[in-house]
Amino acid sequence: MIMKHFRKILLSAALFGLMSSGTASAAGKLVLDGSTTVGPIAKAFASHFYKETGTQVTVSESGSGNGAKSLINKTCDIADMSRPMKDNELAAARSKGVNPVEHVVALDGLAMVVHPSNRVNALSKAQVRGIYMGKYTNWSQIGGPNAPIIMIQRESNSGTQDSFKELVMGKDNPISKRTETQSSNGAIKSRVASTPAAIGFIGLGFVDNSVKALLIDGVDPDAKTVKNGTYPLHRPLFMYTNGQATGSVKQFIDLPKTAEGKKIISEIGFVNYY
C-alpha cells in the first residue's frame, strides 16, 4: 500500500498543482507540525533556513496524525508525516477548503532494534510479525537468550506505527495487547537501550550505538538497501502543504532537492530521495 501510494506521488502532485497555497502563520515565520520521525530533518532544515533567509521556523513533533489535523485546521504551514495522508484526512481537509499536496522529503528504513547484548542479529519479517502477535514470547524460541520478549510499539496516532502495521503485520494480524507503547522514536530507543529483553522499531535516522539494528530477511537496514528497495521495511517520508507551495513555504519544501539539503538528510542518518 505504501509503495503503491509512493508511485502515485507525482500524479497526485500534478492533480493538486494548480491549487493555491494556504498560510497558517504570520509573514516571516513558518510553522511545522507532525511526525517525530521527520522531526530531525525538519529541525535541521529550520536551523539552516533561518541562517539563510532569516525566516523563523517552529517545529512541533506531535505525531503524523496531529500534523494532518494541524494542516486541516490551518494551524501549520507544513505537516510532517511518516505515512501518506489517509482518505478520511483528505476528505476532512477538502471539507474545510484545504487541499493537501504531498512532497517526498527523504526515504527511511524502519529499523527493528534490540539491546546490544542480545545475541540475536537477524530476524525474518515473519518472525517479527510472530513476536508482535504473541506467537513467540521468549527469545530462546528464535535463537536468543532465555528471557521473555518485551515488545515496544508506538501510539495509535503515529505514522511509524501505521507503517509497521502495513509493512510487517498486515491487515489480519493484530498486535498483542501485551505490547508496551511509547510516544516517540526517541522514547522507544531509550526503552530498548535500557532493557536487555526488549525489541522495538524506529526510523533509521535514530539508530545509534545504544541499540542494535537487526537484519530483516537477511538485509541490513542502511542507505544503500533503503534506496534500492531491497530492505523490506523501507518507506518514504513526507511533508504536506495546503495547495501548491509558494514563497518561503516552497523554498523550505524544496530544500531536499538542494546540495545542502541532501547533505543535511545524509548527516542525520536518513536517505536522499532526489
Image (cartoon, rainbow, N blue to C red):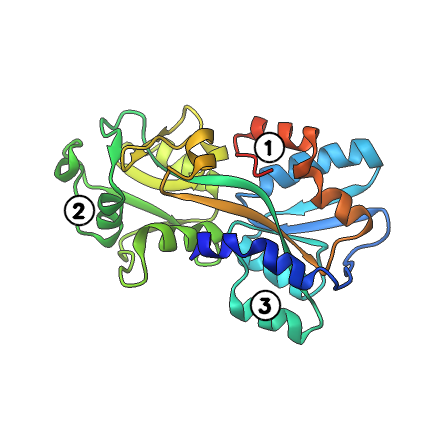
Which residue lies at the image location 45% right of the left edge and 56% below the top edge?
A: 4
Q: CA distance from mark 3 to mark 2?
A: 38 Å
Q: Is residue 271 left or right of residue 166?
A: right
Q: Position of residue 242 (x, y in %)?
A: 71, 60
Residue 263 sits in quarter: top right
Q: Position of residue 5 (x, y in %)?
A: 49, 57
Q: Which residue is mark 1?
A: 265
Residue 46 sits in quarter: top right
Q: Are marks 1 and 2 in contact (CB under 8 Å)?
A: no
Which residue lies at the image location 44% right of the left edge and 39% below the top edge?
A: 109
Q: Which residue is mark 3?
A: 90
Q: CA distance from mark 1 to mark 2?
A: 36 Å
Q: Nearer the viewer, residue 255 or 32?
A: 255
Q: Which residue is mark 2?
A: 136
Q: Say which element carries label 3.
A: helix
Which residue lies at the image location 56% right of the left edge and 49% below the top edge?
A: 35
Q: Position of residue 205 (x, y in %)?
A: 50, 34
Of callouts 1 and 2, the N-terminal one: 2
- Mark 1 crowdedness (10 Å alpha carbons): few <14, some 14-19, many ≥20: many
- Mark 2 crowdedness (10 Å alpha carbons): few <14, some 14-19, many ≥20: some
Of callouts 3 and 2, the N-terminal one: 3
Q: Say which element carries label 2.
A: loop
Which residue lies at the image location 56% right of the left edge and 67% below the top edge?
A: 89
Q: Are marks 3 and 2 in contact (CB under 8 Å)?
A: no
